[in-house]
Amino acid sequence: MNLREAFMEEFGNLSKKIQNNALQGKIQMFFRLELCEEISKTDLAKALEVTEGNLVNAMENFILYGVVEEKDDTYMYKGYPPEFKDLVAMLPDRKKKLQDSTDRLAALVSEAEAQGQEVKEFLRVISDIKRDFGLK
């Protein structure tokens, strides 16, 4: 089981359900998994196997909410502001979907850990998601 792919796929599916845009979930997970604070548009598009045009369109919400800053041909990941907890709390259906996805990822990580895989990075990502969105 490849946890990195599972995380990307889970948040891609979640984003498809919530915003009808799977790429946004994959972008979020890319930044969380890679601990990449700065990346060129070209490199990010290649990493996500999408066109730069599709990437630019998917990045609009991240830029609008201050999660990512755009400078020249580069995206700089700033992280989620604390207000996101309040935003998610106002959208109980979205919060439930986020919680369900996070729970599925936690189960995959537990399974991988039981098989002897190194899971520290994935536990950090789950913890960050819970903190950023006010999940349990």
Image (cartoon, rainbow, N blue to C red):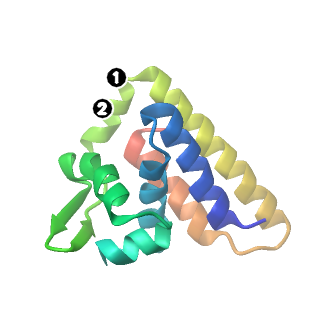
**How would you rate the neighbour count of disc 2 (Cα within 10 Å): few for under 14, some for 14-19, many for 20 or more?**
few
Per the image, label 1 sits on a secondary structure element best described as loop
Q: Residue at x 67, y 69 (%)?
A: 119
Q: Residue at x 44, y 42 (%)?
A: 21
Q: Is residue 92 above or below residue 76?
A: above
Q: Is residue 46 visible?
A: yes
Q: Which mark is residue 90?
A: 1
- Contact? badges 1 and 2 (CB < 8 Å): yes
Per the image, label 2 sits on a secondary structure element best described as helix
The residue carrying mark 2 is 86
Among all residues in the image, which is located at the extreme left? 72
Instruction: Give amino acid for label 1.
Output: Met
**How would you rate the neighbour count of disc 1 (Cα within 10 Å): few for under 14, some for 14-19, many for 20 or more?**
few
Closer to the camera, 16 or 103?
A: 16
Quick check: 103 left or right of 126? right
Q: Residue at x 46, y 32 (%)?
A: 18
Q: Residue at x 48, y 46 (%)?
A: 130
